[in-house]
Image (tube, rainbow, N blue to C red):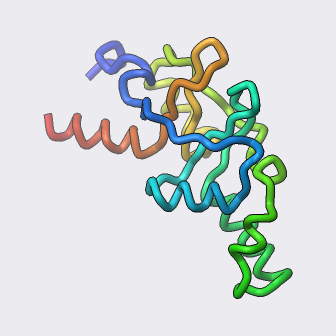
Amino acid sequence: MTTAKLGSVADIMSHDVVTLRLEQTLFDGNELMREHKIRHVPVLDEQDQLAGLLDQKVVLREALRIANDHGTHRLDHYLKQVPLADVIHQDFLTLPIDTPLIEAGQRLLSHRQGALPVVDDGRLVGILSSVDFVRLAVNLLEA
């Protein structure tokens, strides 16, 4: 199959993006990821602009740091004290909505990010994850 038939990231990205607000806490992020069974959450600022990306690695890193500093018995209490603004990835790639899938896949691989927010005119419109590419591969193999 040629890349022309595959289209762009808009064809396979998740459109119903679950997001957090910059003023929320790490506890909120952890609960949201658990509830929706996701590993990456874009974080928006007061103007609904993409401010960062929260992932499971950040939650785990901070949970281990807090457990080391304070013990595991009160982890939720301390997670509620950690603002997302202090821990999210703020240096990350985004993809324009018309990015060809081959290019998006190459970026996922070369930058080793598990997910890339998709933007259109600077606004978050979706998120493309490695799971989207696995789903695409399975669909192509079944065809």
Viewer-proximal residue among 79 and 107: 79
Which residue shows up at 62% across the image and 20% down it? 123
Q: Quadrant of the C terminus?
A: top left
Q: Is residue 103 left or right of residue 15?
A: right
Q: Quadrant of the N terminus?
A: top left
Occupied quadrant, residue 19: top right
Q: Is residue 122 left or right of residue 46?
A: left
Q: Is residue 130 left or right of residue 4?
A: right
Considering only vertical position in the picture, is 15 above or below 21? above
Occupied quadrant, residue 134: top left
Q: Position of residue 54 (x, y in %)?
A: 66, 49
Q: Position of residue 39 (x, y in %)?
A: 53, 53
Q: Is residue 71 left or right of residue 48?
A: right
Which residue shows up at 58% across the image and 15% down it? 120
Disc tally is 0
Q: Position of residue 51 (x, y in %)?
A: 74, 34
Which residue shows up at 44% across the image and 57% down it? 37
Q: Position of residue 75 (x, y in %)?
A: 71, 77
Viewer-proximal residue among 87 and 94: 87
Viewer-proximal residue among 26 and 8: 26
Which residue shows up at 69% across the image and 73% down it? 76
